[in-house]
Image (tube, helix red, strand yellow):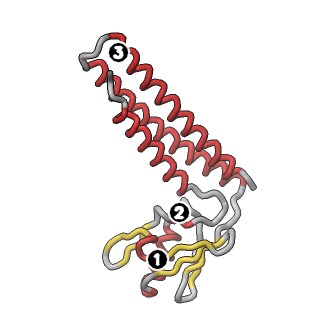
Amino acid sequence: MYDTNEVKAKMTAAVDRFKEELKKVRTGRAHPDMLSGVKAEVYGQYSPLNQISNISVQGANMLLITPYDVANIAKISAAIRADQTLGLNPSDDGRVIRVPIPPLTEDRRREIVKSASSKVEDAKIVLRQARDDARKDVKGSELTEDAKKRAEKEIDDMIKNFNSEIDKLFAEKEAEIMKI
């Protein structure tokens, strides 16, 4: 019998990565993960904001960033402004940075959904690659024809389940984004 645990692990990892990518997608409410892709140049190297500051939510539409070293405030603000995909305009008072989260327009919501849908396709590509690799392993193995067919069916069932999970996660995120 073909061991499908390795294929299942690859597919589970793809879904987990997709979940992490969805956390970064802006929904109109303040969330610290919104800034997880932003890196600021401090001490001669680029570092993620969560390694050089504390990011917290202050109300539904405000992020509060407290740098560990106040000398980096200007660099952190500049890094947030430079990320055009976020469309954020931070302000600082010398100790902390406040990042107001503007309400999303209908057009911007649709753009965000479109961007998130590309992440869906990326995740499904990884699933298909894992399936194809598993099928090659099954065909190259010394299993009987019946065992090969059972293994292929099991792999196909797995990919259907994982695809439906990705579709469900995306539908939930899309509803969250489009909600006013």
Mark 2 lies on a secondary structure that is: helix
The numbered dot on residue 179 is none
- Amino acid carrying mark 2 in the image: Asp
Please tell me in which quadrant of the rendered image residue 47 appears.
bottom left
Q: Which of marks 1 and 3 is nearer the N terminus?
A: 1
Numbered disc in front, either 2 or 3: 3
For image coordinates 75% across by 56% down, the residue present is 180
**Residue, disc 3:** 147
- Amino acid carrying mark 1 in the image: Ser
137 relative to 144, above or below: below
Q: Residues within 10 Å of mark 3 (few under 14, many from 20)?
A: some
Foreground of the two, 35 or 85 = 35
Mark 1 lies on a secondary structure that is: strand
**Residue, disc 2:** 33
Compute the Cα span from label 1 to label 2: 13 Å
**Residue, disc 1:** 53
Mark 3 lies on a secondary structure that is: helix
Image x and y of residue 164, in percent: 56, 34
Image x and y of residue 46, in percent: 36, 70
